[in-house]
Amino acid sequence: AQKITQTQPGMFVQEKEAVTLDCTYDTSDPSYGLFWYKQPSSGEMIFLIYQGSYDQQNATEGRYSLNFQKARKSANLVISASQLGDSAMYFCAMREVLYSGGYQKVTFGTGTKLQVIP
Amino acid sequence: NAGVTQTPKFQVLKTGQSMTLQCAQDMNHNSMYWYRQDPGMGLRLIYYSASEGTTDKGEVPNGYNVSRLNKREFSLRLESAAPSQTSVYFCASRGNPYNSPLHFGNGTRLTVT
């Protein structure tokens, strides 16, 4: 079964509008964490935001916020006031502990390509 | 600050050749990871290392070996390269706090002909 699912291969958004990128996850680890990364066309991976499973409030970082719905196992990224520089691939990732060794494994979704239209 | 350094940036191999991808981090992180990125498949974990001297398989370990030489360095070896290993490879490291993100290197673009 997929651990992390991103169902939107591609999205378009008008400049200055808000956009939501979907992410659902599956884990039996009660103490997990969720990350979002941005990958521009230059290829580097840029960390955007983190949400822990026990965090009471949704995480926010500037124009990025995470809509965390624990019961639905979803962790959607909301980008407000989109800019042309937001055009990139966006990956959702999950940190979980593997009980066999206590290792912290980080698994990625397949990504969503966001294009911001002027 | 260097962060995570990967070498080489680009490599072309013939089928059957071997090579080692090098990765080093200067952030004193315990955990290190190797991922491969293929179109439409996101990043898939090849191997990871929770600490110096320990390694474990990820989702797609076949055809690869790793060495955690010391706390700083984590290398990935292709013993007999195959066209299916054409990909972009990323090394990453992570600190101990539960909310620590992965810090990535800039990637190695490998083509196997």
Image (cartoon, rainbow, N blue to C red):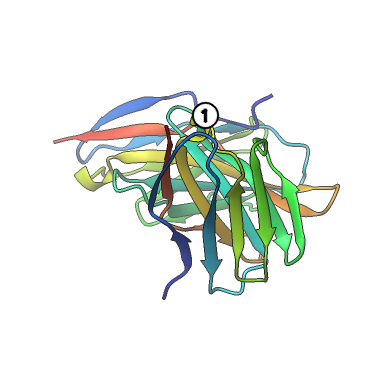
* A48 horizontally vs A63: left or right: right
What is the total number of numbered labels drawn onto the structure image? Answer: 1
Residue A82 lies, with reference to residue A55, above or below; the image says: above
Assign a secondary structure to mark 1.
helix
Q: Quadrant of the C terminus of chain A?
A: top left
Residue B74 screen position, x and y as percent: 61, 61
Can residue B101 be seen from the camera position used here? no
| Chain letter for mark 1 | B
Residue A19 screen position, x and y as percent: 34, 35
Quadrant hosting residue B80: top right
Quadrant hosting residue B75: bottom right
* A14 horizontally vs A89: left or right: left
Looking at the rendered structure, the kind of residue marked 1 is Ser
Residue A69 screen position, x and y as percent: 60, 36
| Residue at image location 86% in from the left, 47% down from the top | A100
Residue A112 lies, with reference to residue B3, above or below; the image says: above
Residue B15 screen position, x and y as percent: 50, 34
Circle 1 Cα neighbour tier, 10 Å, few/some/many (<14 / 14–19 / ≥20): few
Residue at the limit of the structure toward the left, as seen here: A118
Can residue A4 be seen from the camera position used here? yes
> Which residue is disc 1 drawn over?
B84
| Residue at image location 48% in from the left, 53% down from the top | A49
| Residue at image location 62% in from the left, 44% down from the top | B79
Residue at the limit of the structure toward the right, as seen here: A100
Query: In front: A56, or A20?
Result: A20
Query: In front: A49, or A66?
Result: A49
